[in-house]
Image: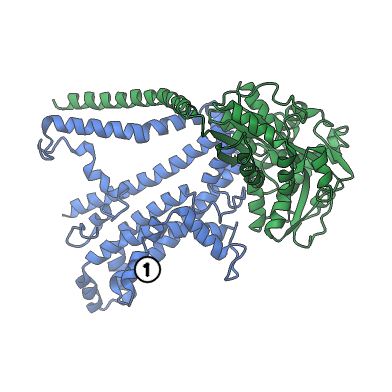
Chain colours: A green, B blue
C-alpha cells in the first residue's frame, strides 16, 4: 500500500526536475542580458570583452595599456580571452558576451556577420578591418639540423611537421595555404598544390594541436622537427630564448588578421574607439615591436629591417578571396583540404 | 575509516566495504529495493518521510545524473545509428579507445600488485616515517590532476633533470595514470589486512606450509575481493582521466591520444556528435566495469551468507 504514493512522489520529483531544468534553461539567458545591461549603466568605467585567436596576446599586452593611456581609453578595463580562432568564433556565435573580436582568418568573422552579430560593412575601412598581419614561416630546432629552408624540405623522409588542426585553428589554414599557393602557382594549378598538401598531411603531420599557440607549446616540448607558424609567433619564441630558429621560405603567404566590433556590444562606442586605435601609428609601432607586420605604410618602412620581404608573397586575394578559398578548400566534408585532413586523421 | 570492517574471518564480506571508494560494493545493501521489508520508522522519517526521501533522491539523481546522461545519449544519436556507429568506429576514435583501455588495463594490473605490496608493508612492517608514507598515499587523491601532469612533465619532460624523457610516449601515459590511481588498491586492501586473523597464518605455518604457500592459500583469498574492487575502481578512473595526461601524454592520435582527449578535440573542431558518441562508448565501458564489480561483490556476499 505504501508503494503507490511513493512511486507518485518519485515521479512528481522527477517531473519537477525536468521543469526546473527547463526553467533554468530559459532563465539563464535572461540573467545574462540583465547583468550586461546593469554593467553598462555606470559609464565611467566600462569593460570590453575581447575574444581573440591564440597568439596576439603578446601584442595586446602592449596595446591595451597604451590605449588606456589615451583619452578615449581611460578607465576602460578589458576581459581578454584567447584560444583557437575557429573555437573562439563559434563561442561568440553561440552567445559568449564579446565587444571586440580579433580572429586569425576572415571566415571566423564572416560567421558572426551571418549570425547578425557583426555589421556587414565591418571591413569597409582603409585597411579592410585588418590592423596587422604576418607571413607563414618554418620554425626548426636551433641550428636547423635537417637543413630545412623551403617547402620541399618538409617532405624529406622522416621529417615530422607540427601544425595545428585547420578545423579549429586559423593558423593551420594559413600554414597550409602557404605551400598550397607556392606549389599551385597562386592557385592556377590546384592539383599540384593539393598533391603537396596530401603528402605533407598524410606523411608528415602527426599531432593535431588546436591552436597556433598550442602547436608552439607542443613543438617546444620536443615533438616534431618542424613547426609551421606565424612569423610573429616564431619571433616571440626566439625572443623568449627558446632553442628554435625560423626561416621564411622564398615563396610564402601573407597573413592578415582581422578585427571587428560587435553590433550587439553594450559599449559600441568604446569598442569602436579601441578598434580605431589599433590602426594609429602609435599602436602600429607596438604591434611591430611585438613581431606583427604593421599595415601602416610609414610604420612598415620604419620596421622594414625586422620584416624581410620574401621573393614571392601570395595573398588570399590571389587565391580568389576567403569566400572562395573557404568553400573550395576548407569547408567541412567537401573542401579539398578538409577531405585530405579528414582522411588522414579520422 | 578502517574500523567499519566486520566479519569474524575477515572474509569476503569485507569487499563490500572498501574504505573511501564506496560506490560498487557498499551500495547494494542500502539500495531502495531492500527498504520495504524493513519496519517503518526505522530511519526516524516515518510513513511520509520515507517516500519524501525517495522523491528527493529521485530528483537529485535525475538532475545530476540521469538527465545529463540522457541528453548526451540523444546527442550521440543525432545522426542516427549509422552516424553513431561511424563516429565510434572512425580509426582515430577506435585508436583512442584502444590506447585508453590498454593503458588502463596495464595501470590496473600494476596497481593490483604494487597497491597490495604497499598495503602489506604499511600494515605488517614497522619502519621510521611509516605514518608519513601512509599519509602520502592519499596525495594523488588530493592533488589536482593537472598538477600531477606538471610534476611529471618537469621530471620526465624535455628538460628532465634525471635524463629520462617520457613526454608524449605511452610509458609516460601509463606513469601519469598510475600516479593518480595509486590510492585505490592500497586503501581497499589495507583495512582487510588490518582485520585479517594472524592466527590463521600462524596455524598454516605451524602445519608446515611455506610462507609463499601461506600467502597464496591463506592470505591472498582473503584479500582478493578487496584487490579486485580496488583494481576495478582504478581501471574505471583511468579510462576517464584527463587532467594528468593532458601535458605529459602528448595527445598524438593513434599513439598517445586517450579517449578523453579525443572527445575534447572533437568539440574543438565542432564535431559534437563524434564527441558524444565516444563519450557514450566510454560510459558503457565504465558502466560495465562497475556492473561486474557489483556482481562480484554480490556473489561474495551470497557465498558468505550460504556458508554462515
Quadrant where the C terminus of chain B lies? bottom left
Residues A128 and B156: in front is: A128
Task: Tell me the SS state at disc 1.
Answer: helix
Residue A70 at x, y percent in the picture = 64, 38
Residue A180 vs residue A297, the one in the foreground: A297
Q: Is residue B214 above or below residue A48?
A: below
Between residue A53 and residue A300, name the one nearer to us: A300
Work out which quarter of the rendered image holds the N terminus of chain B and state it: bottom left
Q: Quadrant of residue A332?
A: top right
- Number of residues whose C-alpha sits closer than 10 Å to that of mark 1, classed few (under 14), some (14–19) or many (20 or more): some
Residue B149 in the image, given as x and y percentages of width and height:
51, 57
Q: Position of residue A231 (x, y in %)?
A: 75, 47
Q: Residue at x 31, y 76 (%)?
A: B211
The answer, for residue A333, to whether it is visible in the render is no
Q: Is residue A313 above or below residue B146?
A: above
Q: Residue furthest front?
A: A71
Q: What residue do we see at 66% from left, 39% from top? A: A169
Which residue in the structure is indicated by mark 1?
B117
Q: Is residue A275 visible?
A: yes
Amino acid at each position: 500500500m505504501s508503494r503507490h504514493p511513493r512511486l507518485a512522489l518519485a515521479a512528481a520529483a522527477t517531473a519537477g526536475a525536468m521543469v526546473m531544468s527547463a526553467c533554468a534553461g530559459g532563465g539563464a539567458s535572461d540573467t545574462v542580458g540583465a547583468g550586461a545591461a546593469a554593467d553598462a549603466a555606470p559609464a565611467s568605467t566600462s569593460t570590453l570583452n575581447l575574444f581573440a585567436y591564440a597568439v596576439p596576446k603578446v601584442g595586446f599586452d602592449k596595446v591595451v595599456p597604451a590605449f588606456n593611456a589615451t583619452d578615449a581609453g581611460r578607465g576602460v578595463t578589458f576581459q581578454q580571452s584567447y584560444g583557437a580562432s575557429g573555437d573562439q568564433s563559434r563561442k561568440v556565435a553561440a552567445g559568449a558576451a564579446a565587444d571586440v573580436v580579433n580572429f586569425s582568418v576572415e571566415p571566423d568573422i564572416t560567421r558572426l556577420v551571418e549570425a547578425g552579430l557583426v555589421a556587414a560593412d565591418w571591413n569597409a575601412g582603409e585597411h579592410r578591418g585588418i590592423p596587422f598581419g604576418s607571413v607563414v614561416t618554418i620554425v626548426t630546432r636551433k641550428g636547423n639540423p635537417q637543413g630545412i629552408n623551403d617547402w620541399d624540405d618538409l617532405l624529406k623522409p622522416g621529417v615530422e611537421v607540427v601544425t595545428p588542426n585547420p578545423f579549429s585553428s586559423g593558423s593551420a589554414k594559413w600554414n597550409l595555404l602557404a605551400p598550397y599557393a607556392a606549389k599551385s602557382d597562386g592557385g592556377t594549378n590546384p592539383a599540384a598544390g593539393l598533391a603537396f598538401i596530401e603528402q605533407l598531411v598524410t606523411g608528415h603531420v602527426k599531432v593535431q594541436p588546436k591552436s597556433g599557440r598550442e602547436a608552439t607549446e607542443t613543438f617546444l616540448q620536443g615533438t616534431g622537427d618542424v613547426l609551421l607558424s606565424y612569423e610573429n609567433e616564431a619571433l616571440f619564441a626566439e625572443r623568449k630564448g627558446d632553442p628554435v630558429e625560423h626561416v621564411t621560405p622564398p615563396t610564402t603567404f601573407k597573413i592578415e588578421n582581422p578585427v571587428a566590433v560587435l553590433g550587439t556590444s553594450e559599449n559600441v562606442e568604446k569598442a569602436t574607439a579601441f578598434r580605431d586605435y589599433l590602426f594609429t601609428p602609435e599602436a602600429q609601432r607596438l604591434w611591430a615591436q611585438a613581431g606583427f607586420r604593421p599595415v601602416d605604410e610609414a610604420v612598415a618602412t620604419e620596421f622594414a629591417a625586422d620584416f624581410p620581404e620574401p621573393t614571392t608573397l601570395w595573398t588570399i586575394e590571389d587565391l580568389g578571396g576567403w569566400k572562395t578559398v573557404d568553400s573550395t578548400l576548407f569547408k567541412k566534408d567537401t573542401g579539398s583540404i578538409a577531405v585530405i585532413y579528414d582522411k588522414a586523421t579520422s | 575509516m578502517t574500523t567499519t570492517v566486520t566479519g569474524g574471518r575477515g572474509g569476503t564480506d569485507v569487499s563490500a566495504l572498501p574504505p573511501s571508494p564506496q560506490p560498487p560494493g557498499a551500495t547494494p545493501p542500502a539500495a531502495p529495493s531492500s527498504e520495504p521489508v524493513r519496519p517503518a520508522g526505522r530511519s526516524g522519517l516515518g510513513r511520509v518521510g520515507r517516500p519524501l526521501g525517495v522523491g528527493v533522491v529521485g530528483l537529485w539523481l535525475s538532475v545530476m545524473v540521469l538527465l545529463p546522461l540522457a541528453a548526451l545519449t540523444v546527442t550521440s544519436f543525432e545522426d542516427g545509428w549509422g552516424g553513431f556507429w561511424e563516429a565510434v568506429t572512425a580509426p582515430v576514435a577506435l585508436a583512442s579507445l584502444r590506447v585508453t583501455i590498454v593503458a588502463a588495463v596495464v595501470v590496473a594490473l600494476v596497481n593490483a600488485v604494487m597497491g597490495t605490496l604497499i598495503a602489506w608493508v604499511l600494515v605488517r612492517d614497522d619502519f621510521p616515517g611509516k605514518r608519513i608514507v601512509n599519509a602520502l598515499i592519499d596525495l594523488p587523491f588530493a592533488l589536482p590532476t593537472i598538477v600531477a601532469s606538471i610534476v611529471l612533465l618537469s621530471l620526465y619532460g624535455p628538460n628532465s633533470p634525471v635524463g629520462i624523457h617520457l613526454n608524449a610516449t605511452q610509458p609516460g601515459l601509463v606513469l601519469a595514470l598510475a600516479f593518480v590511481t595509486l590510492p585505490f588498491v592500497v586503501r581497499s586492501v589495507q583495512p582487510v589486512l588490518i582485520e585479517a586473523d594472524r592466527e590463521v597464518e600462524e596455524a598454516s605455518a605451524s602445519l608446515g606450509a611455506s610462507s609463499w604457500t601461506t600467502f597464496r592459500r591463506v592470505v591472498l583469498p582473503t584479500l582478493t575481493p578487496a584487490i579486485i574492487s580496488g583494481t576495478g575502481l582504478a581501471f574505471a578512473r583511468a579510462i576517464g582521466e584527463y587532467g594528468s595526461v593532458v601535458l605529459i601524454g602528448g595527445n598524438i592520435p593513434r599513439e598517445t591520444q586517450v579517449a578523453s582527449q579525443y572527445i575534447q578535440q572533437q568539440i574543438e573542431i565542432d564535431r559534437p556528435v563524434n564527441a558524444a558518441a565516444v563519450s557514450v562508448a566510454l560510459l558503457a565501458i565504465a558502466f560495465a566495469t562497475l556492473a561486474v564489480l557489483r556482481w562480484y561483490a554480490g556473489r561474495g556476499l551470497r557465498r558468505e551468507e550460504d556458508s554462515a
